[in-house]
Amino acid sequence: MSNETNKPQKISLYAQTFWGGVLVNISTFLLGLLFMGAGVLAGSHAMEWVGFLMFWITVSVMAINRGKDRIAFTCPQELADHLRQHYGVVGKEAE
């Protein structure tokens, strides 16, 4: 058996602004609502139910995730420093 912990891992850090997060959430809700609306227009009960389920699964997942402890970082460098300090993750320059 090989020791897989010695394999280098690649981690990418992405920053998201407050308004970017709001737009992602709005678009997620709209996806379910528009799917239901398309089902109504097309007369497809199956499409309506799929949109309904998508909407409520999204709402449920967001409600469940709200209760979890999280650490917010205002910039990617803060996250990189946190990963280095607590987990020993060391990055390298992008090629």
Image (spheres, rainbow, N blue to C red):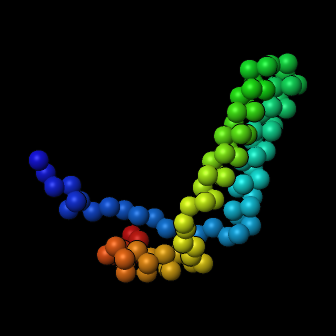
What is the total number of numbered labels drawn onto the structure image? 0
Q: In this view, does 54 lie above or below 91?
A: above
Residue 61 vs residue 22, the one in the foreground: 61
Locate residue 47 relative to residue 75 in the image: left or right.
right
Point out the residue furthest to the left here: 1
Vertical position of residue 47 compared to residue 19: above or below: above
Q: Where is residue 84 in the image (x, y as percent from the top left)?
A: 37, 78
Asked if residue 75 lies left or right of residue 45, the reply is left
Please provide percent x and percent y for residue 92.
35, 75
Q: Residue at x 45, y 64 (%)?
A: 12
Rendering quarter of residue 49: top right
| Residue 91 appearing in the image | yes
Q: In this view, does 50 lie to the left or right of 68?
A: right
Say which quadrant the C terminus sits in.
bottom left
Residue in front for this viewpoint, 65 or 3: 65
How far across and down, in percent of the image, does residue 3 sit? 16, 55
In the picture, measured across the screen, residue 19 lies left or right of residue 5, that is right
Can you give x and y, in whole percent of width and height, for residue 42 in the image? 84, 21
Q: In which quarter of the image is residue 67?
A: bottom right
Q: Vertical placement of 8 versus 85: above or below? A: above
Between 62 and 9, the one nearer to me in the picture: 62
In the image, what residue occupies the spot 50% across and 80% down?
A: 78
Q: Residue at x 76, y 46 (%)?
A: 29
In this rendering, the answer to whether 46 lies above or below 63 is: above
Q: Residue at x 44, y 78 (%)?
A: 82
